[in-house]
Image (tube, rainbow, N blue to C red):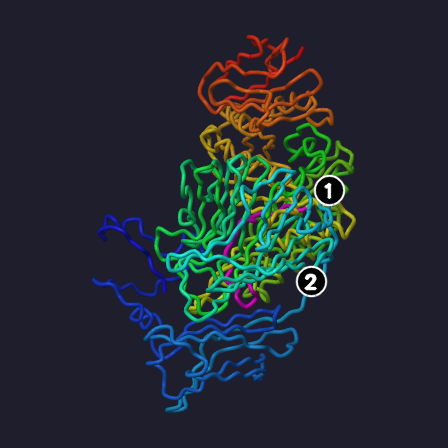
Amino acid sequence: MGEIEFNGTMTAENLNGLRLGTSSLENNFEALSLQIYDRPLTRNEIAMMGLGKGGFDGRITYFPSINQLILEAETNPYELPRQPEISLLVTDRNQNILKKTDYHLERDFQRISQGAIRIRQRVELPELKEGEYNCCLRMKSGEDGSVGNFLSRTFSVRKYPWENNRIGLSRKIVPPFIPLTVDGHDVKALLKTYTLAGNGFPEAIAGNGENILAAPISVSMTAGSRSYAWRHAPLRFTAKEPDRVAYQVSSANDLINMQVDGEFDYDGMLKLTLGITPVRNNVEIERLSLDIPVRKEIADLFHAAGSGNRSNPAGKIPPGQGRVWGARSLPHYSPNFVPYIWVGGAEKGICYAADWDKDWVHSKKKSEHAAELIRQPDGTLLIRLNLLNDAVLKRRHEITLALLATPVKPMPEGWRAWSDNYSNFKIPGKRFLQCLYAPQYFGAFFYCQSRYPSFHDYEVIHKMDEARRTGKADEKFLATHLQRIARAPLREVPYRREGMDKVKIALQCGFNQMTGLAGQKPEDTVAYFYTCCYESNDLLHEYKTHQDEWEYRRKAHPVKSWRDFAVYYDAKMLDAGMDGIYLDNTAMAVKFNWPTGDGYIDEEGNIQPSFGLWRMRNYIKRLATMFVEKGKEPFIYVHDTNSLYLPAFSFAQATMDLEWKYNDSEYQDRYSCDYLLAMCAGRQGGFFPACIDGIVAPPEKRPWLTRTMLACFLPHEIQPTTWISAGTDLPTYRKIAGIIWDFGKGEPDTRFVGYWEKDNPVQPQSGSLIASSYHRKEKILIVAGNYGGDDTIPIKIAGTAVKAVNAETGAPLSLKGNQVILPIKKHDIALIEITLQ
């Protein structure tokens, strides 16, 4: 049953764009019939019509990791025979009954409307051998003894070597993180110190030595238009270990008791579980809110993320006082909940995150927001989480969320000398990165979700590693491998459906990417391979067994058994010669897997989703730990387009944004500098920063569009990558990048100052110029991008300049006192070399 809210007069013209379902195949449906009514139908009428007569609608799903079937069925009780005998049966291929579970309408079904009842049950399975099994919901009539089978299906049992493996699950600390320490109520992690107050929440958080908070984090409660004060028991630490610190505080007021359980992970993330219990039944609460006050000097930018991407806000915090942003403005799955908000500056800040809204109580008033940003008169910016809003408490509520201060970690060592997509771009550097941008490039048997080469034959990876070192592909091996693919059954290599020419081209591309690294020392190169975190797994060999668990109601996302599968094969790729892993589709994604704890059932019996915070965090942390277990330096490259929820990515080394807005427009018309600083510059998380170039234009337009892209990227030290449609004009990019490199970008005695820094010694005096600079000895190289029109802009320099030249052309620029006069085109980039006295 679904519904669409339509505002306005319902006419044929107004309904012209109405679509039922989605434009993709995911989670879609077929319309068996269409009926039009001239009045609104009640929910009971809809339920009775949808269920039809005399049977069950629903599904039986198989979850191999917990060895259970999940029965979910609805029926119209008025259409059932009297005294029906209802059983779930599991049989083998010879129809031998291996499991029989009986159900009773009164005991096991719950009424969900006048015309519908529902059953939702776990069914424990016996130990089953590998093979095919059948299951169904059988109903025998108590009137005439007739039997009907419903929801019949076959499920496949097969054991895999990766199941429940322990790869990446040790408690080794991933560099550059350091062990946690506790000093009184101070908990110290890398780059940050949390000082805990008596209520169990931080009263101060020092990020890189500066307090982020304007005041202590607090919980306030109002009921009956009255505020309630708290009483706190002493804070008690329950664990002090190098990778984990835990504590507990009990608080109370006249209406509720609250227990705060805090747990620090060694990246500095604080996981908070709030157990809220009313002192009596039916306690009415207007609001229970958690306030995170961020200092006005730090609260400049924000980012909020929901399910999906390309619609998440990021950039400058909206102006004004009072509420300046609220959760209801975020277009995603939940109309009044947001699972992630970060507030801060180019580096320092703080984020809140949650995996779901289980046990939150949301107000039905559209003027109320479950999460909001509130600017106070003194400029302090509150992240306010309205955990309980217009609530009547009848039981204990348990709410889990996380806090993480930024920067999460330092930028990677030597990152300014990294050159990404080197085989194509050939930008100078000291560490040369190259991705195999599709599984087909390393000989996988189909698309995004492939995790291993065809036939599980890792010789192709060994040969690619060999090509990286020698500069030559083994043509004899390639020919033999392609012949093997051509002769194999299509089910083993479904990618062959695209034609052997495409198979050959893709594999040759992979070898070309590796030979492109051959001019560099192998130890200075990083070969990393494509993987995907959110996509259909329907062509995987494992899909037949794990399809229900991995794709229950939605595409696969890193649930626990999927992580076991992925890490197992990721480890094999590293063992075969790869150095790193690229993760695509890492945005938050809703999953309804309540049987495995990746969703929950609310008080009305509806399945509600998790958003993927813990799934993605656990997966990336496990990958990073796997590298350490193997004695390798972690290299995890996250494609995070418009969804940079930092607690999930703490253990990654690189991020890539901007897989959208591909066109032939100038970059300043696509992305603001505030967006790039909040989302793409990498400094909040300690990530090597890259963005997809996204230039789709005829060759004659590419040089200019490349300049507009570099004008946006390079003042943030963002590298363009991927080369979508061969869009970046390589001569233009190589020339500009070469000038910056030759100045000393990658040298230890060069200092970079971003245009956003308070004490920036380079200050444009007018226009819309962003001007960052590199400082080396008595010289400055200004990298300026113009977000305005054609202009002549004075740039004030700290110090006495004796010479200024356009570093691209060598032409001198005029000096007036301590100002350089820069004529610049609309949306252009300028490199200015200054010689100081």
The answer to whether marks 1 and 2 mark residues whose Cβ atoms lie closer than 8 Å is no
Query: Of residues 71 and 469, which is closer to you in this image?
Result: 71
Tell me which corner region of the image, top left, top right, bottom left or bottom right, holds residue 286: bottom left
Tell me which corner region of the image, top left, top right, bottom left or bottom right, holds residue 394: bottom left
Q: Residue at x 59, y 32 (%)?
A: 718
Q: Where 35 sits versus 641, above or below?
A: below
The mark that comes first in sequence, 1 or 2, is 2
Q: Where 689 sits versus 386, above or below?
A: above
Q: Residue 14: x and y, percent?
A: 25, 49
Q: Which three-letter amino acid code belongs to the residue tagged 1?
A: Glu
Q: Which residue is mark 1?
A: 475
Which-is-in-front pick, marks 1 and 2?
Answer: 2
Element at badge 2?
Answer: loop
Q: Residue 309: x and y, percent?
A: 49, 46
Q: Is residue 453 visible?
A: no
Q: Is the residue marked by circle 2 packed among few (<14), some (14-19), or many (20+) residues within 10 Å?
A: some
- Look at the image and tell me in which quarter the C terminus lies: top right
91 left or right of 366 in image: right
Tell me which corner region of the image, top left, top right, bottom left or bottom right, holds residue 148: bottom left
527 left or right of 133 in image: right
Q: Residue 781: x and y, percent?
A: 63, 19
Q: Where 474 sits versus 731, above or below?
A: below
Label 1 and label 2: CA atoms lie apart by: 33 Å
- The span picked out in magenta is 581-599
Element at badge 1?
Answer: helix
Q: Is residue 12 visible?
A: yes
Q: Is the residue marked by circle 1 packed among few (<14), some (14-19), or many (20+) residues within 10 Å?
A: few
Query: Of residues 473 and 120, which is closer to you in this image?
Result: 120
Q: Which residue is mark 2?
A: 162
832 left or right of 381 in image: right
Total numbered circles: 2
